[in-house]
Image (cartoon, rainbow, N blue to C red):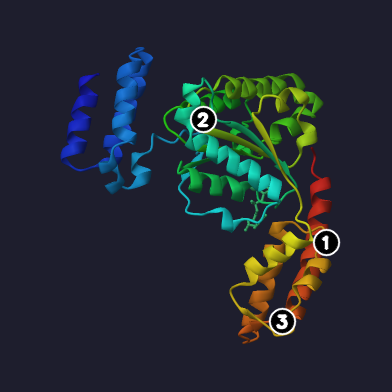
Amino acid sequence: MNSEKLVKIFKAFIEKNNETFYKIAWEIIDEEKRKKHHLLATQLKHILTENPVASNINYTQQLPPIPRDNEKGFRLLDVKKFCMDWGDVVLAKETEETLRQIVKELEIEKVLATYGLKPKQKILFYGHSGTGKTLTAKILSSVIGYPLVYVRFESVISSFLGETASNLRKIFDFIEKGKWIVLFDEFDIIGKQRDDPTEHGEIKRVVNNFMLMLENYEGESVLIASTNHPHLLDIGVWRRFDEIVYFDLPDKERRKKIFEKYLRVLKKDKDFDLNKLSEESEGFSGADIEQSCIGALKMAILNGKDTVSLLDVIKAVSRQKKRTEAKKVIRYERPY
Ligand SMILES: Nc1ncnc2c1ncn2[C@@H]1O[C@H](COP(=O)(O)OP(=O)(O)OP(=O)(O)O)[C@@H](O)[C@H]1O
Ligand SMILES: [Mg+2]
C-alpha cells in the first residue's frame, strides 16, 4: 500500500470521515486484488461488509465508489435498500411461486453447496410494461435482504461503443464487491439497437460482451435482466438464464385485487362494485390500474369528498385508456 493512502486512511479515521475512509478502503482492496492477494482482499472486504458495527454508519457512505460513465460523467448504477414484501404486488399464482422458490434456494445456499448445487442466480423477467417487473425486483431485494443495484441499460450504452464495453466492465467490477440483487432494467435496448443495420457488427459485440460477463459471473449476487420486448432477444440470450419469469397482464380477479389495493386510501361509496371496475379495465396493466386509482382519489379529494365513488374510478379508467392509446402511438413511432 502506498504511503499517501496510509496517511489518508489514518486521517479519515481520526476525523470520523466515513466517506473518505470507505473510499480509500475500497481502493486498497482493489489494489490487493490487482496484486493477486485474493485472500487478503476477501478478508478486508468481509471486515467492511459483514461487520455488525457498520450498521451504525450511513449505508451509502459504506458503498464502494459508484462507477461513472467517462464520456458524460453520470452514475452507471444506483444502490438502494427497500422494505417491502409479497403483499405489495399482485401476481399470478405460478409467477409468485417461481419467485418464492428462488428465495428459498438462496436461503438454503449453504446446504445446496454441500451437494455441489447452486441457487438460481441469473434470471430473466419478461412481460408487458407496467406489470410489476421492477417492483418485484425491489420486493426480492427486501425479502432476501440484499440491497438493489439498479442499472438502466439505456444509460450504459454510450455513443462510443468502446465506452459501452468499459461501462459494462465497471458495472461488473462493482457487483463483484458485494452481495446484491442486480436489476439490469430495459435490457432489451441492446437487442433493439441491434436491429439498426448501421450499428450491426459493433452492437452485436456489445451484446455478446454482456452475455459473456453474465455467463462468467460466479459471485454471490442475483442478476436479473428485465425486458418487455423478449422477441428482440435471440435464443442464445435466453438459454443463458437459470430461470425465466413471465409477467402477464392481470386477469379479472387480479385486477380487482389491484383496484382494492390502490383505493385503500379512501373509503368506498356503499354501492361500490369492484366487479364492474374489473370488467371496464380489461387489458390494463397493474401500473394502468394504479394510475386510474390515483386519478380517482385526487378527483374525490379535490371535490371535498371523504369517499370515492364507482363513477369517479370509471371516469379515471376511461382517461387512462386514452392515455395508453396515445402512448402506443408514440412508442410505435420511435426510430427503433
Ligand atoms: N402486479 C402488480 N401489483 C401491484 N402493483 C403493480 C403491479 N404491476 C404494476 N404495479 C404498479 O405499477 C408501478 C409500475 O410497475 P413496474 O415499474 O414494476 O412495471 P414494469 O413491469 O417494470 O414495467 P416496464 O416494463 O415498463 O419497466 C409499480 O410501482 C406499482 O405501483
Ligand atoms: Mg421496469
- Mark 3 is on which residue type? Ser
Which is closer to the viewer, label 1 or label 2?
1
Residue 282 seen from this side: yes
- Distance from disc 1 to disc 3, alpha carbons, whole Å, reads 20 Å
Q: According to the image, label 2 marks what residue?
A: 171
Question: How far apart in space, not on screen, are marks 1 and 2 (Cα)?
Answer: 40 Å
Image quadrant in which the C terminus is located: top right
Q: For the view shown, which residue lies furthest in the left direction?
A: 14
The numbered mark, 1 or 3, whose residue comes first in the sequence reads 1
Q: Residue at x 72, y 60 (%)?
A: 254
Do labels 3 and 2 touch, CB within 8 Å? no
Kind of residue at disc 2? Ile
Above or below, 299 relative to 247:
below
Q: Name the element at disc 2.
A: helix
- The residue type indicated by label 1 comes to Glu
Disc 2 crowd, CA 10 A, few/some/many (<14, 14-19, 20+): some
Marks 3/2: CA–CA distance:
48 Å
Of the 4 image quadrants, the one containing the N terminus is: top left
Disc 1 element: loop
**Residue 309, disc:** 3
